[in-house]
Amino acid sequence: MLIFDQSRPGRQGVTPATAPSEALSGLPINLRRTKPAPLPEVSELQAVRHYTRLSQKNFSIDT
């Protein structure tokens, strides 16, 4: 299951930091976002559980 499948509008684990205006001034306008990044709206607990579950499915040469 993708983390985007668990996404529900309004859920928020952490508020993303906003970039200061002086950081954006060095970035060309054609490279700036015109709309917010499509991040999943999940709680912090859901994100931890999701990535823990993925790590348990991770197999390597050593296992």
Image (cartoon, grey):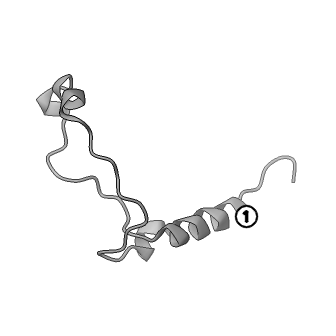
Q: Is residue 14 above or below residue 49?
A: above
Instruction: Give residue 50's position: percent from left, percent from top.
Output: 57, 68
Furthest residue toward right: 62
Instruction: Give residue 31's position: percent from left, percent from top.
Output: 20, 33
Q: Residue at x 20, y 31 (%)?
A: 24
Instruction: Give residue 33's position: percent from left, percent from top.
Output: 19, 43
Q: How many other residues sit within 10 Å of disc 1, few (<14), some (14-19) or many (≥20)?
A: few
The reply to whether residue 1 is in sight is no
Amino acid carrying label 1: it is Gln
Q: Is residue 30 above or below residue 15?
A: above
Q: Nearer the viewer, residue 3 or 44?
A: 44
Q: Nearer the viewer, residue 4 or 43?
A: 43
Q: Residue at x 36, y 74 (%)?
A: 11
Q: Residue at x 39, y 73 (%)?
A: 7
Q: Quadrant of the C terminus?
A: bottom right
SS for dot 1: helix
Instruction: Give residue 38's position: percent from left, percent from top.
Output: 30, 58
Q: Nearer the viewer, residue 61 or 3?
A: 3
**Residue placed under numbered mark 1 in the picture:** 56
Q: Is residue 22 left or right of residue 14?
A: left
Q: Is residue 50 left or right of residue 55?
A: left
Q: How many marks?
A: 1
